[in-house]
Amino acid sequence: MSKTSPKDIDDDDTWHQFSDAGYSSASVNFDNEQGKDIQVNSEEEWFDGDDFEFEGKTLDWNSPPCPTPLGIAHMIKIGTCNHCLKRVSGKNNMSGEEIRIEAYTRDNSLESSFSNDLCPLCENLFDDVDNIVERIIEKINNLEYTTIQIGIHLPKDLIQEAHEITSRHGASQSMPLKTSMVLDIQNTINNNLNADINFVKDKPDIMILVDGLTLRVDVDVRPIYYYGRYRKLSREIPQTRWPCRACKGRNKGCDSCEGSGLQYIDSVQDLVGEPLRIALDAKDTSFHGMGREDIDVRMLGLGRPFIIEIKKPMGRISEMSNLVKEINTNSDGKVEIDNLIKTERSLIAKIKNSRSDKSYNIRFRISEELEAEFITNSILELSGVIINQETPRRVSHRRADKIRKRKIVDIYNIIIENNEVEFSIRAEAGTYIKELVHSDEGRTNPSVSDKLGVDCEILWLDVNEIHDDEENKDN
Ligand SMILES: [Zn+2]
Ligand SMILES: [Zn+2]
């Protein structure tokens, strides 16, 4: 696939390449080329007597550049159209037609020498603007947006040829062909829609790419990102969508997933994302959480920060609070969110790289009853300690895992009821709490099981809080 195919522009990097190619590169090339031409001009011998011909009209390389009357007269003689006359003549306050009439008044022989063939500076591309705009409006008519970016691809040889002429005979502040075309398209869209659309050069809601050769119009709707925090009150749902283990979600599911294609019917991603996707008439969602908890672990407190990405949204939402209510009602107590705030893609990396402490509640059963005081004291010995953890067996089966050091910041609220024990704990990011309790056959050291000298069977685990705000304060 080529870099400029609209299907490619899924991530920000290619996106920027793409928009640059369609927009700002023309003026950069223009300046470079101009430098070269000045050098060539200084060599008198370069002109070998062969007149450069365009569509049968001879170019006079010696005529002075615009905005001199001779320069403008020359542009008219070679067949420059009104659009191009305006952009290369250096007379910014006049329309192309006014510039032409002024020149005809000065030299009435000019009118008869002008032929209406192809304009050498645009090959009459500006005549296609109405047609292009019609196609654009047809494609964006049902979309909702606040910003639009327009890019245009023009044949390289046209740009080079137009540029060669402009750099010799055009005014020094001539507007490049691409820039001029884009402006003309934008103005025509606004006129035809009787609108005042905010056209931008970066991060648009909608990207429109026009192929100047085929007049093909491609519209790319950029994803929308919402930031929120979720509480997960169920021990039976994963954070993100899980494809069915048997069919991997292919071919519209199998018998074991009853045609859903999913291992778990519900997920935080879909309980939050589906109402959004439907409201925005979008294609799909992507879920980016600040870490994740196990399926059987609840997420309480203020909830876990996340960003949900809505792909190819054909609509926009103005009133978010109703949708938040709808999400909470539909998820039937499994998931709760307080709000959703529109954000940008760059925040995903911040969320993913966050290394904040977390607080938990854990309850477990011990294999022999022990004295309460002994239990309390043994567990408290782990408070403030740095522990060594190999990657848990449930996560990885590889042998040579690195041992990670994690700090147990605090342990408190120890409750003992016969052979069941419960406590609260705050630990450094990345600590495996279940393993800290049952020791994972010695792969976590020290551990609660080790300290008590008995086996510990986990009953449940809750994440009580993610201390990301405190992390922000430190920075
Ligand atoms: Zn032209
Ligand atoms: Zn299946």
Image (tube, rainbow, N blue to C red):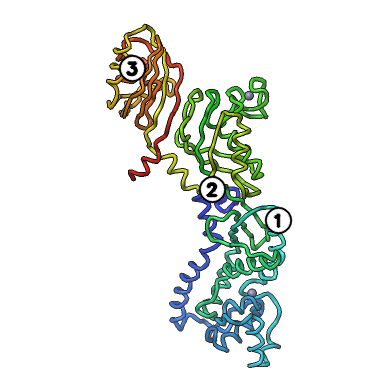
Amino acid type, callout 3: Val
Q: Position of residue 72 (x, y in %)?
A: 59, 85
In the picture, residue 415 is in which quadrant? top left
Using the image, determine if residue 74 lies above or below residue 343. below
User: Callout 2 environment at 10 Å: few (<14), some (14 to 19), or many (20+)?
Assistant: few
Using the image, determine if residue 273 lies above or below residue 368. below
**Quadrant hosting ligand 2:** top right
Residue 342 disc label: 2
Q: Which residue is the site of mark 1?
A: 141
Q: Is residue 439 left or right of residue 260?
A: left
Amino acid type, callout 1: Asn
**Which quarter of the rendered picture does the C terminus lie within?**
top left
Distance from the alpha carbon under mark 3 to that under mark 2: 43 Å
Using the image, determine if residue 313 lies above or below residue 305. below
Measuring 50% from the left and 47% from the top, which residue is drawn there? Answer: 345
Q: Position of residue 217 (x, y in %)?
A: 66, 57
Residue 448 disc label: 3
